[in-house]
Image (cartoon, rainbow, N blue to C red):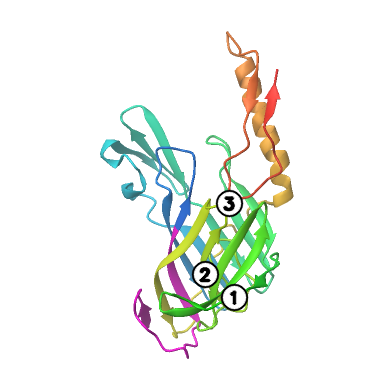
Amino acid sequence: MKKVLFFLVLSTSLMAQNIKVNFKFHVNTIYDYTSTSKNFTLTQNSSNSLFKFDDINNSDQIKYKEQARLMKTTDTLTTFLINGETLLTFYRQQTFKNFVKNIQITNYKLEFKQPQVYVEDKINMFSWEILSKKDTIIGGFNCKTATTNFRGREYLAYFTSEIANQGGPWKFDGLPGFILRVESVDGYLLIEPTEIIISKEASKEIINPFENKKVVFFIDLHKILVEKDKRYVSRSKSLPNPPDRITMSVPDMIENTGLSEKIYE
């Protein structure tokens, strides 16, 4: 097994079968209590990959961790109590890819008391343009740069052919090399590696965590979110002193679901 840390220069002849990359997943969310940086781990072999939220019990991911107390942990959720009054919940977001079938599945938690939604996409859904610019060194690897527009945002991706695997973090894929870093041009999203581990050992099975789950397609998220808003409005209207007007804002999500601000009266 060869372990690759930053600032370590490596041979360009690595022929890896298995790879594990720890990533920092930065999202400029509007929610004040969570850090914009989350830990994710990507494990990948020649057939499958799994990108999952790591260290879900790590209170370092909470800005006011000195005020946080662990309340409850389940297979999918961890809940903290902040300053004795505010509930903060993390959920284990994961993206599983099956390269043989050209499918990937990502789980979404859209409502706290509602089941998760499992969204299926094609792996090769990106249209990339490889830029003719000087290579960038990331984690000791020479990386080329490519750009794409994906569901409302323009991205730059840095990928290397010095790792035998193709693929990348979260949903990103489809370049002639392994994607080590992704950033949105608007500054909303940044995914960058902190540790890269490459192994030539026999391939280990990567289990699909969404086996036998009912999946929907991304286009279905629009309808699901609209129904969520309607349930919220219905609950609000049933209060003893219901508001005259309810404004539902656009979901703070990485992907554009096609929703716009809507006013219910």
Q: Which residue is mark 1?
A: 47
Give 186 or 14, whichever is nearer the viewer: 186
Q: Mark 3 is on which residue type?
A: Asn
- In the image, which disc is placed on residue 107? 3
Tell me the element at label 1. Answer: loop
Tell me the element at label 3. Answer: strand
Q: CA distance from mark 3 to mark 2?
A: 17 Å
In magenta stretch: residue 243: no
Contact (Cβ within 8 Å) of mark 1 with mark 2: yes
Q: Earlier in the sequence, mark 3 or mark 2?
A: 3
**Residue that sits furthest to the left in the current view:** 66
Tell me the element at label 2. Answer: loop
In magenta stretch: residue 22: yes
- Tell me the residue at 38%/30% (across/down): 86
- Tell me the residue at 53%/56% (across/down): 94
Residue 230 pos. (x, y %) = 68, 27
Residue 88 pos. (x, y %) = 41, 37
Residue segment shown in magenta: 1-24
Residue 188 pos. (x, y %) = 53, 50
Image label count: 3
- Tell me the residue at 46%/38% (across/down): 31
Q: Which residue is mark 2?
A: 206
